[in-house]
Image (cartoon, grey):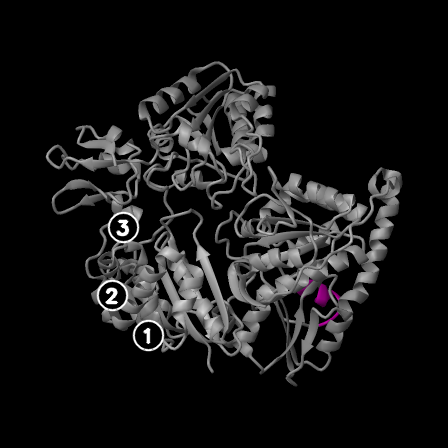
C-alpha cells in the first residue's frame, strides 16, 4: 500500500503527543510499518507543536512533506490554518473549534481573526469538531485529545484496530473508561 | 520483541543490551531523553553531570576503570567536551566508550548548526551515523565492539530527526559483558609528550585497520537496483533519498562514516553515470570522495544548510514542487514560545525591560525569551555560562572607553550557573569587575524538560543527594554583595536591581522561586507553601482598559477588545501576582484558588 500521512498540530500542553503515541502504537499492533516525527519548540509550553505520523508497508522518511498529508487534525484553529500547506489537494482537515491566543494577541499587538474556519473551508474539505466542549461534557476537558484521535481513526478507516486495549495499556487505570468513551465520541462525531 | 521507540529511546535500549554499566550526560535538546531513558535500566549507573566536559571525563574514567560507558550531549555540548575528547582519543579505552552527539540540522532548538562529523576527523575518533531507531540501537551495540577492538572512544552522530522520530525496533536481552581488569599502565594513560608521541602512532595504526573494517562493515552496504544513477547517503538523508527516488536509483548506505569505506565507494561509483552525495549540513563525504578522484554531485545542487527533507530534495534535483494550499498569510499569526503563566522569570524581565541604562547579557535557558516582546530586555547571548564572562568583557570595554551610559547585567539560570557560570563569576571577582549578575534559581533545569541538577537536592534516578548551595558558591567566588529575593515581588526586584547597580564592585542577585511546571519535592512544599495555589481576577468596574498589565507578557491574560477590559484565564493563571502589581488601578486581586 501507499504510505499514509497524518499530521496532528496544536499548542504545547494540548495533548497532541499522547494522541500520536496511541495512534502509532495501534498502527504498529495492526502490522503496519510506522514512523513518527515530532518537533516541539524551544520552550516547555505555549509554542506550536506538531506530530507527523506515517504508516504503510515500508516507510522511509519520518517527515511528512508539504502538500502530501491525507489528513491534518488541528487541536486549535490558528494551528489548523498554519498547517494547511501540509494537506494534499484531496486531503481532509479536522479542526477543533478552540482558540488559544498567541502572545502577540495577548499583548494587544494583533487581533485573533474571527474567520479562520471560513478561510479554511474556502480552500479544503473541513470538518469542525467541538472536541473541547465534548470533553467537558464527558467530565474532563483533557480528553479532548482522545476525542480528536477518535475522529482520525474513523476518517482513516482504522476502526478495526483494538483501540480499547491500546488505551488500557497506555493510560492510568482510573482514566481508561473515560478515554474509551472519549474515543467513541470522537469516532461517532465524524 | 518489537517496540516503537524514538532514536533516543533506542540508544538507551542499545546501551542496556550492550552491557553498558555507566552513563552520564548534561541535558540538551535533542539529546536529553537518552539519559532519562538509560536511567530506567537499574543495571546502568546513570548520572547528570554539571556540564559536558565533566560528563565525558567521567565516562572516560569509567572506561579506564573497566566498565562500558556511555556519554550523551547536544552538538554544542561537544564543544565543551572537546578538551577531554581529543586526548581520550590518544589514550584509547579499556572497556568500550561511546560519545553520542545529537546534532541539529534545521536548528529547531539551538543557536548554531555545527556539523559534528567534523569532530570525528579533528579529534581522530571513528564514527557511526544511524538513520532510524533500529539502526541507532544496532549500531550502538556494534560501536562498543569497535571501541574495544580498535582501542578508541567512538563518536556516534544522531540528528534531531533520528533522536525524536519513532520507528519499530527489534529488541533483545542484555548481553552480560565481562568487566575489564584495571591495570596501571602509564604509557597508555599518561599522555606526557614522550608517551603521547607513541599514542599518536598507535592511533594512526588503529585508523589504518579501521579502513578495512569500514570497507567490510555490514553498516556500509550497497543496494543495487541496476541503475546508472547512484546515491551515497548517510543518516536520515539516506531515508529522504529513498523516499524520493525509491528503486529508480542504486544506493550506497553509509552507517560507519569515519573513516569512509573508500574501496566500497570506488566500486560503487564504477559505471555510474551520475553519483549524488546525500549528507546533512557540511560537504564532508563529498570532499573526501572528490579528493579520491571520484566525480560526484553534492552541495552545488543540494542545500548545505538546514535539513535535507524530501521536498527540498525534489526541488533541488527534480525541479518538482508539490501543489500546496496556502492560507491567507495575513491571517496566520506566529506562535513563538512564551514564558509560562507563573514563570518566576517574568517579574525580573518586566523590571529589566523597563530600564534603558542596561546592557543585558543573557544565557541559554527559558530566559532566552527575555529578548522577546513585551520585555525586549536582552542585548546579547553566546553560549552556556557566557552571560557572566562575556558581560564582564563588555563592562571592561565600557570602562576602557569611559562610557557610563549603560551598565552590564548578566543573567542566567541555576543549572547554567553550575554548568559554567561559576568559573565566569571567578573571572568577574578576580579581575575586579563591577557587573551585576542575576541568577534565576527556579530549582530545576527548566528548558530541557525538568532535569535535576546539583542545586536541586536530587540526582537523575530521583534519589536524594547533597544540595549545592548557590549562595555559598557565590560567596566562595569572592562576591561580597549578594542578596536572595522573591522574584514575584516587583518592588523587591526593582530595589534589588537598583542596589546591585549602585554597589561598589560586583553584585549578585539570586531569585529563588520554583519553575511553575516543576514537580514539587518535599523541600519545595515546605519552602514554597503558597506557590501556584492562587488565582488572580480582574474587577471590571475598576479596570480602565489601559493594557499596562499586558506588559507582563503573561499567557493567562486576555484583553477583551469589544469592552476594552482585561481578563484573566482562570484555568491558566496560578496567581503569581505580577499583573496585579503592575495594575495602576488595583483592579486585579489575588486570592487562594
- Left/right placement of residue B121 relative to residue B476 reads right
Which chain does the residue under circle 2 lie in?
A: A
Give the structural element (helix, strand or loop) at label 1: helix
Which of the marked residues, 2 or 3, is nearer the chain's N terminus? 3
**Span colored in magenta:** B285-294
Image position of A67 with respect to B100: above or below = below
Q: Out of B349 and B16, give the one closest to the viewer.
A: B16
Disc 1 crowd, CA 10 A, few/some/many (<14, 14-19, 20+):
some
Which of the marked residues, 3 or 1, is nearer the chain's N terminus? 3
Image position of B73 with respect to B322: above or below = above
**In magenta stretch: residue B286:** yes
Distance between mark 1 and mark 2 Cα atoms: 13 Å
Give the structural element (helix, strand or loop) at label 2: strand
Q: Quadrant of residue B145?
A: bottom right
Disc 2 crowd, CA 10 A, few/some/many (<14, 14-19, 20+):
many
Distance between mark 3 and mark 1 Cα atoms: 29 Å
Residue A101 bears which disc, if any?
Answer: 3
Residue A154 bears which disc, if any?
Answer: 1
The residue lying furthest to the top in this view is B504
Amino acid at each position: 500500500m501507499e504510505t499514509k500521512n497524518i499530521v496532528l498540530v496544536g499548542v504545547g500542553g494540548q495533548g497532541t503527543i499522547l494522541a500520536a503515541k496511541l495512534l502509532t502504537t495501534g498502527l504498529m499492533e495492526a502490522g503496519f510499518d510506522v514512523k513518527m516525527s515530532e518537533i516541539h519548540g524551544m520552550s516547555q509550553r505555549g509554542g506550536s507543536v506538531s506530530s507527523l505520523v506515517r504508516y504503510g508497508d515500508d516507510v522511509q522518511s519520518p517527515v511528512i512533506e508539504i502538500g502530501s498529508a491525507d489528513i491534518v487534525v488541528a487541536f486549535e484553529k490558528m494551528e489548523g490554518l498554519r498547517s494547511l500547506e501540509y494537506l494534499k489537494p484531496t486531503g481532509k482537515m479536522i479542526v477543533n473549534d478552540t482558540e488559544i491566543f498567541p502572545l502577540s494577541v495577548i499583548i494587544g499587538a494583533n487581533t485573533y481573526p474571527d474567520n479562520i474556519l471560513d478561510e479554511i473551508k474556502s480552500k479544503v474539505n473541513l470538518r469542525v469538531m467541538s472536541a473541547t466542549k465534548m470533553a467537558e461534557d464527558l467530565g474532563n476537558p483533557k480528553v479532548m485529545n482522545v476525542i480528536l484521535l477518535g475522529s482520525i481513526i474513523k476518517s482513516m478507516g482504522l476502526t478495526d484496530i483494538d483501540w480499547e486495549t491500546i488505551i488500557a495499556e497506555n493510560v492510568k487505570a482510573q482514566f481508561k473508561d473515560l478515554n474509551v468513551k472519549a474515543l467513541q465520541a470522537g469516532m461517532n462525531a465524524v | 520483541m518489537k517496540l516503537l521507540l524514538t532514536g533516543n529511546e533506542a540508544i538507551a535500549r542499545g546501551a542496556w543490551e550492550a552491557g553498558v554499566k555507566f552513563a552520564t550526560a548534561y541535558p540538551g535538546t535533542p539529546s536529553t531523553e537518552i539519559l532519562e531513558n538509560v536511567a530506567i535500566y537499574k543495571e546502568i549507573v546513570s548520572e547528570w553531570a554539571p556540564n559536558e566536559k565533566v560528563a565525558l571525563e567521567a565516562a572516560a574514567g569509567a572506561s579506564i576503570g573497566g566498565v562500558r560507558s556511555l556519554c550523551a550531549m547536544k552538538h554544542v555540548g561537544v564543544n565543551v567536551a572537546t578538551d577531554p575528547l581529543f586526548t581520550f582519543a590518544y589514550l584509547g579505552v579499556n572497556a568500550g566508550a561511546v560519545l553520542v552527539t545529537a546534532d541539529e540540522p534545521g536548528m529547531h532548538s539551538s543557536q548554531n548548526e555545527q556539523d559534528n562529523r567534523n569532530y570525528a576527523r579533528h579529534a581522530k575518533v571513528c564514527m557511526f551515523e544511524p538513520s532510524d531507531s533500529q539502526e541507532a540501537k544496532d549500531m550502538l551495540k556494534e560501536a562498543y565492539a569497535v571501541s574495544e577492538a580498535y582501542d578508541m572512544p567512538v563518536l556516534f552522530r544522531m540528528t534531531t530527526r533520528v533522536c525524536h522520530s519513532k520507528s519499530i525496533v527489534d529488541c533483545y536481552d542484555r548481553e552480560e559483558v565481562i568487566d575489564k581488569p584495571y591495570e596501571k599502565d602509564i604509557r597508555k594513560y599518561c599522555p606526557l609528550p614522550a608517551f603521547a608521541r607513541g599514542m599518536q602512532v598507535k592511533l594512526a595504526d588503529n585508523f589504518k585497520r579501521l579502513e578495512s573494517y569500514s570497507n567490510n562493515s555490514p553498516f556500509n552496504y550497497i543496494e543495487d537496483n541496476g541503475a546508472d544513477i547512484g546515491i551515497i547517503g548517510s543518516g536520515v538523508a539516506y531515508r529522504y533519498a529513498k523516499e524520493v527516488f525509491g528503486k529508480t536509483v542504486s544506493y550506497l548506505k553509509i552507517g560507519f562514516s569515519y573513516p569512509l569505506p573508500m574501496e566500497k565507494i570506488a566500486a560503487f561509483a564504477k559505471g555510474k553515470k551520475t553519483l549524488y552525495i546525500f549528507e546533512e549540513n557540511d560537504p564532508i563525504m563529498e570532499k573526501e570522495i572528490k579528493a579520491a578522484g571520484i566525480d560526484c554531485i553534492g552541495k552545488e545542487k543540494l542545500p548545505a544548510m538546514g535539513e535535507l527533507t524530501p521536498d527540498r530534495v525534489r526541488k533541488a534535483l527534480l525541479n518538482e514542487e508539490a501543489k500546496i494550499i496556502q492560507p491567507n498569510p495575513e491571517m496566520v499569526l506566529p506562535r513563538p514560545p512564551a514564558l509560562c503563566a507563573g514563570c518566576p522569570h517574568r517579574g525580573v524581565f518586566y523590571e529589566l525591560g523597563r530600564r534603558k541604562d542596561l546592557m543585558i547579557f543573557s544565557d541559554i535557558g527559558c530566559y532566552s525569551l527575555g529578548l522577546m516582546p513585551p520585555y525586549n530586555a536582552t542585548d546579547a547571548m553566546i553560549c552556556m555560562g557566557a552571560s557572566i564572562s562575556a558581560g564582564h568583557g563588555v563592562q571592561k570595554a565600557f570602562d576602557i572607553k569611559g562610557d557610563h551610559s549603560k551598565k552590564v547585567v548578566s543573567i542566567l539560570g541555576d543549572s547554567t550557573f553550575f554548568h559554567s557560570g561559576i568559573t565566569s563569576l571567578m573571572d568577574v571577582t578576580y579581575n575586579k569587575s563591577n557587573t551585576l549578575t542575576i541568577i534565576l534559581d527556579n530549582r530545576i533545569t527548566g528548558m530541557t524538560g525538568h532535569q535535576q541538577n546539583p542545586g536541586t537536592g536530587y540526582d537523575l534516578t530521583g534519589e536524594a543527594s547533597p544540595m549545592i548551595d548557590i549562595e555559598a558558591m557565590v560567596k566562595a567566588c569572592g562576591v561580597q554583595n549578594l542578596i536572595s529575593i522573591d522574584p514575584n515581588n516587583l518592588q523587591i526586584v526593582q530595589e534589588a536591581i537598583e542596589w546591585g547597580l549602585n554597589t561598589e564592585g560586583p553584585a549578585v542577585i539570586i531569585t529563588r522561586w520554583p519553575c511553575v511546571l516543576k514537580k514539587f519535592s518535599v523541600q519545595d512544599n515546605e519552602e514554597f507553601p503558597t506557590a501556584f495555589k492562587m488565582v488572580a481576577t480582574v474587577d471590571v468596574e475598576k479596570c480602565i482598559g489601559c493594557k499596562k498589565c499586558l506588559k507582563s507578557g503573561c499567557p493567562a491574560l486576555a484583553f477583551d477588545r469589544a469592552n476594552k477590559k482585561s481578563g484573566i484565564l482562570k484555568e491558566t493563571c496560578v496567581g503569581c501576582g505580577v499583573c496585579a502589581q503592575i495594575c495602576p488601578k488595583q483592579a486585579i486581586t489575588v486570592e487562594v484558588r
